[in-house]
Image: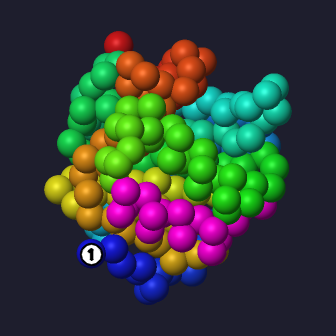
């Protein structure tokens, strides 16, 4: 069963984490500065997260969104494959460089996931995600936080909106494969999202 979580703190209106702006110079991609560490909430539990890297997603040479990858602090991951398979709290933050309507955004997600798991895989889950994105279109400066919740599934939150929770671990795993797996959205994105891993 898919549910919307309505109770969320004012402190996370711009995402599902609290950014330590002053103490952390962070990494800047496009218009967004991503901190190297942050205090987050995954599956309703506080988690200290560290940046694994950041990159820019483009389409037809236009900048669409920057993206940063975070994983639970002190988890040993050395490369993209280990980051994909790690069954630990992890997050992707998409920060948009331009307005994207709900139809275009949901279609992009469906197509990207379809590269890994073609239809009809995740049909019900993607229908729920589509309804959520159509209800919460993104503007330039908006963020979407995608959370991998171990043993539960996917959390998706557009800034200023309630979080959508989809209890399907395989779907959450597939989203990480879209960016970091063998059939990814591009070498530059995969490399960027792992550029801060200790090897």
Residue 173 showing in the rendered view: yes
Write the residue at 78% across / 35% down: 63
Which residues fall within the magenta stretch? 123-141
Residue 68 higher or lower than 23, as above or below: above
Specify the principal SS of the magenta part: helix
Quadrant of the drawing holding the C terminus: top left
Residue labelled with disc 1 = 1
Look at the numbered disc 1 and give the secondary structure of its residue: loop
Left or right of 106, for residue 121: left
Rendering coords of residue 174 (x, y %): 35, 40
Comparing 105 with 25, the one in front is 105
Q: Is residue 58 magenta?
A: no
Write the residue at 63% across / 74% down: 135
Q: Residue furthest bottom?
A: 7
Rendering coords of residue 97 (x, y %): 78, 46
Q: Is residue 139 magenta?
A: yes
Quadrant of the drawing holding the N terminus: bottom left
Write the residue at 62% across / 30% down: 55
Comparing 171 with 50, the one in front is 171
Write the residue at 59% across / 65% down: 133
Rendering coords of residue 163 (x, y %): 47, 72
| Badge 1: residue crowd in 10 Å (few <14, some 14–19, many ≥20) | few
Residue 72 showing in the rendered view: no
């Amino acid at each position: 069963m898919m549910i919307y979580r309505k109770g969320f703190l004012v402190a996370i209106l711009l995402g599902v984490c609290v950014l330590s702006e002053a103490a952390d110079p962070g990494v800047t991609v496009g218009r967004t500065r991503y901190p190297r560490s942050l205090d987050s909430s995954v599956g309703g539990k506080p988690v200290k997260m560290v940046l694994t890297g950041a990159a820019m997603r483009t389409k037809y040479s236009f900048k669409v969104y920057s993206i940063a990858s975070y994983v639970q602090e002190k988890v040993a991951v050395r490369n993209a494959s280990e980051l994909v398979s790690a069954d630990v709290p992890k997050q992707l933050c998409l920060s948009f460089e331009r307005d994207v309507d709900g139809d275009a955004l949901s279609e992009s997600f469906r197509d990207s996931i379809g590269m890994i798991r073609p239809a009809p895989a995740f049909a019900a889950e993607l229908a729920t995600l589509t309804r959520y994105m159509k209800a919460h279109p993104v503007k330039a400066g908006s963020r979407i936080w995608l959370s991998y919740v171990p043993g539960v599934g996917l959390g998706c939150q557009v800034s200023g909106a309630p979080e959508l929770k989809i209890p399907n671990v395989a779907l959450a795993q597939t989203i990480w494969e879209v960016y970091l797996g063998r059939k990814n959205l591009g070498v530059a994105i995969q490399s960027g999202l792992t550029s801060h891993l200790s090897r």
